[in-house]
Amino acid sequence: MCRLILAHGSFDPADIVAAAVQMSCGVTANHDNANTVHAHGWGAVWRDPVDGRLRAHRDVRPAAESAVDSPVATVRTDFLALHVRNATLPENRGIAFTHPLERPEDDWYFMHNGYLPTVHELLGMSASVFDSAEYFDYLIPPRTPSLDQATALARLRAIPAGGMSGNAVAVHPDQAHLVHWSPPETRTPRFFAMHRHTTADRVVVASETVPDLAPADQWDPLPADTVLTFPFARVSVPVSDRISV
């Protein structure tokens, strides 16, 4: 299982990176899951507010070892999302499984917190290979330009029983989306809760409340079955080029 955090608006990326590191180490853990450490790599996706391009960074090392000194902490951006990972299956470790997942043909990045081992059935596959990648293709079919709440929730509710959560961040050059959804049979609902901190010039959504970002009473629980959309301001420079660091 993993931890997610995103920020949109005016913020210091170093603060968001530090918050992700704290979640990865269990410093801010206050939930109903025995797992509090997420050391199987991390990744980030952000937007350049000048040219509109999306950029990504992936690292197979624990975030506690490599995130604070990474390029991500000093980027200039108005949107940043991070994913710190604890792989559900030992065989699904390494750079190929490190989020954000990417689909270059239609400019989507995707991060998932949860385990959905049955979603492959809806893609006509005989067995699951990597549930997060299968979930990505199911929730946002190729060539889909955006994600709306009604369509997303209908697709989520059609997933066969047996999964834990579909919490996700999906990022496209025009907008980003935060998906907060877990099936009724989820055994650790507090672990899969999402929390939102809002000020006049920024929104932060995270898997855990982070006191270093804001006191506990300034975080609100995100309602279940929610899809938030964060539109990006248009720029005059084409955004088709993808850059990873």
Image (cartoon, rainbow, N blue to C red):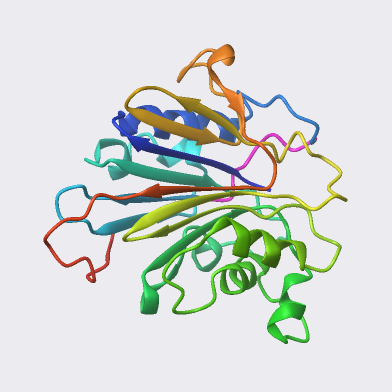
Viewed as shown, does residue 146 lie left or right of 244? Answer: right
Depth check: give the residue in front, 99 or 194.
194
Q: Residue at x 69, y 53 (%)?
A: 114
Query: Is residue 187 shown above or below 104?
Result: above
Q: Is residue 132 magenta?
A: no
Viewed as shown, does residue 120 lie left or right of 160? Answer: left
Depth check: give the residue in front, 226 or 142.
226
Q: Position of residue 81 (x, y in %)?
A: 43, 45
In the image, farthest residue toward the front: 150
Query: Is residue 8 shown above or below 162?
Result: above
Q: Position of residue 65 (x, y in %)?
A: 46, 38
Viewed as shown, does residue 25 lie left or right of 234? Answer: right
Q: Residue at x 78, y 86 (%)?
A: 126
Q: Position of residue 127 (x, y in %)?
A: 77, 81
Q: Please tell me in which quadrant of the rendered image residue 11 appears.
A: top left
Query: Is residue 123 shown above or below 36?
Result: below
Depth check: give the residue in front, 24 or 215.
215
Instruction: Count the numbered circles shown.
Output: 0
* Residue 45 appears in the rendering: yes
Q: Please tell me in which quadrant of the rendered image residue 3 appears.
A: top right
Q: Position of residue 171 (x, y in %)?
A: 42, 57
Identify the image quadrant of the C terminus: bottom left
In the image, farthest residue toward the left: 236
In this picture, which residue range is highlighted in magenta? 34-41
Q: Please tell me in which quadrant of the rendered image residue 120 appears.
A: bottom right
Viewed as shown, does residue 62 lie left or right of 27? Answer: left
Q: Residue at x 28, y 51 (%)?
A: 47
